Image: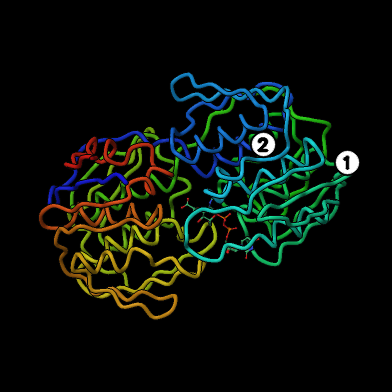
């Protein structure tokens, strides 16, 4: 497995353009199956999970090609409704293929999804939502077999928020017969971006950005050219990189409207920023304060995907902070590795108590995507050199974290 070496203690002071959003691009790629034509995704992130999803689409019979950061998907002729088992079980987002395969074919075969080991990650909400639209499921040899003679509109009520289940419900409803009302929807930007894509491709979705979506089924989607939005988690990662080095930095075209909770926490520890003409100017010279209490939550709360990365920043703060993880039950995987660097963190269930101090470079291992990014950020703030193993976990969601951090003035290298 690959490594990233980081030389710590260099205050960042450069600029970086933010890549396309992983968690917006993946469901939109699945949605492209609902168009018996060509879908063009501009600004699509060139990351491992997108390449895996692309291979799954190819396995179903879609034709794909890249023109720089534009991904072209032609789903005119599909030969199969069975997603590749090896690829599908390596990533969580393969599960949203359920809704689009049912919408396209009336049936689908998927492996049970994999992805980051941050909790049980059941799919009950996905299946219940699609059953409401008429789908039936059975499990055989680790695969999920789905079928629906016809998807019919209905009322879906989610008992709790789920990004992926909301996306699956939308994908099942957009071409169903009749109208669907979905209550208790996730309001994450990645749900809204999927809905905007679908409407641009001919869908009839109202209530975007709210917890209640009304979807009038259409016969199919049409060709469209869509710009994938910037990745709010990658952007937040680089705000944290600036903070831990007490440097500065300029982010180009970050989705600042989707980063309010992160920026509020950044200001609370002493960070300063201003946003002008698509540029986010960061000034972190005073970003050394502690935070008292922070908890993750559904949007627009503090994003769970930035929890471990912000936790890394707090290990170098002055004073004590506590973070509560409310979304996933096992999302402190980076803590033992941060402790190898001298971090003073005590875990009590879903709460991490962090006593700020200093970090020293060490050899540490990434165990999942965002925890791996947290170790890289910690390396920026540590004394000496840090080596993060299992770089492949990080490459699932970041095009090239080393390239981006070096553009901000860091000294990192991949080997
Ligand atoms: C999406 O995962 C993202 N992944 C995650 O990002 C992100 O952390 C998460 O949303 C929350 O924002 C993608 O978009 C590919 P959920 P998802 O369904 O859809 C429980 C990253 O690092 N749940 O909103 O799987 C679940 O266990 C990744 O980019 C059920 O109980 O998240 C969790 O506790 C990590 N039953 C909570 O809901 C279900 O059927 C939220 O999960 C589904 C979920």
Q: Which quadrant holds the C terminus?
A: top left
Q: Residue 319 in the image: state x and y as whole percent.
A: 22, 74
**Is 237 rendered above or below residue 251?**
below
Q: Quadrant of residue 392?
A: top left
Q: Nearer the N terminus, badge 1 or badge 2? A: 2
Secondary structure of the residue carrying tag 2 is helix
Question: What's the CA distance linking mark 1 and mark 2?
Answer: 17 Å
Number of marks drawn: 2
* Left or right: 37 as drawn, with respect to 25: right
**Is 361 rendered above or below residue 234?**
below
Q: Quadrant of residue 378?
A: bottom left
* Left or right: 61 as drawn, with respect to 226: right
Can you identify the residue that label 2 sits on? 31
**Is 197 rendered above or below residue 363?**
above
Residue at the location (77% across, 49% down)?
A: 146
Q: Residue 33 in the image: state x and y as whole percent.
A: 69, 32
Which of the pair 159/268 is nearer the observer?
159
Secondary structure of the residue carrying tag 1 is loop
Is the distance from the Cβ of mark 2 to the nearest ligand 1 atom less than 8 Å? no
Q: Residue 50 in the image: state x and y as whole percent.
A: 50, 37
- The residue carrying pointer 1 sits among few (fewer than 14), some (14 to 19) or many (20 or more) residues within 10 Å by Cα, namely some
Query: Which residue is at the far bottom?
Result: 348
Can you identify the residue that label 1 sits on? 177
Residue at the location (40% across, 39% down)?
A: 254
């Amino acid at each position: 497995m690959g490594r990233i070496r980081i030389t710590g203690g260099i205050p960042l002071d450069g600029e970086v353009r933010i890549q396309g959003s992983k968690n917006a691009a993946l469901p939109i790629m699945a949605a492209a199956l609902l168009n018996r034509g060509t879908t063009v995704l501009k600004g699509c992130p060139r990351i491992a999970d997108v390449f895996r999803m692309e291979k799954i689409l190819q396995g179903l019979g879609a034709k794909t090609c890249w023109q720089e950061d534009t991904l072209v998907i032609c789903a005119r002729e599909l030969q199969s409704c069975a997603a590749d088992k090896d690829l599908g079980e390596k990533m969580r987002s393969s599960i949203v293929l359920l809704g689009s395969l049912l919408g396209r074919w009336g049936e689908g075969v998927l492996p049970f999804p994999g992805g980051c080991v941050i909790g049980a990650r059941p799919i009950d909400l996905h299946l219940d939502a699609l059953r409401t639209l008429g789908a039936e499921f059975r499990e055989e040899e680790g695969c999920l077999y789905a079928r629906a003679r016809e998807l019919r509109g209905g009322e879906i009520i989610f008992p709790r928020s789920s990004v992926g289940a909301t996306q699956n419900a939308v994908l099942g409803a957009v071409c169903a017969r009749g109208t669907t009302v979905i209550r208790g929807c996730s309001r994450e930007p990645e749900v809204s971006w999927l809905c905007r894509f679908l409407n641009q491709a001919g869908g009839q979705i109202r209530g975007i950005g709210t917890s209640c979506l009304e979807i009038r089924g259409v016969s199919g989607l049409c060709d469209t050219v869509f710009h994938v939005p910037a990745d709010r988690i990658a952007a937040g990662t680089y705000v944290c990189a600036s903070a831990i080095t007490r440097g500065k930095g300029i982010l180009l075209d970050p989705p600042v409207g989707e980063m309010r909770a992160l920026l509020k926490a950044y200001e609370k520890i002493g960070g300063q920023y201003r946003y002008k003409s698509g540029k986010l100017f960061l000034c972190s010279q005073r970003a050394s304060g502690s935070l008292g209490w922070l908890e993750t939550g559904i949007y627009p709360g503090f994003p769970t995907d930035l929890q471990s990365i912000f936790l890394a920043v707090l290990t170098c703060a002055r004073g004590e902070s506590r973070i509560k993880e409310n979304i996933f039950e096992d999302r402190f995987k980076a803590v033992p590795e941060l402790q190898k660097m001298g971090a003073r963190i005590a875990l009590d269930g879903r709460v991490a108590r962090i006593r700020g101090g200093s970090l020293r470079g060490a050899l540490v291992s990434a165990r999942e995507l965002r925890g791996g990014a947290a170790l890289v950020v910690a390396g920026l703030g540590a004394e000496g050199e840090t080596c993060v193993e299992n770089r492949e976990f990080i490459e699932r969601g970041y095009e090239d974290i080393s390239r981006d951090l070096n553009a901000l003035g860091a000294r990192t290298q991949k080997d």
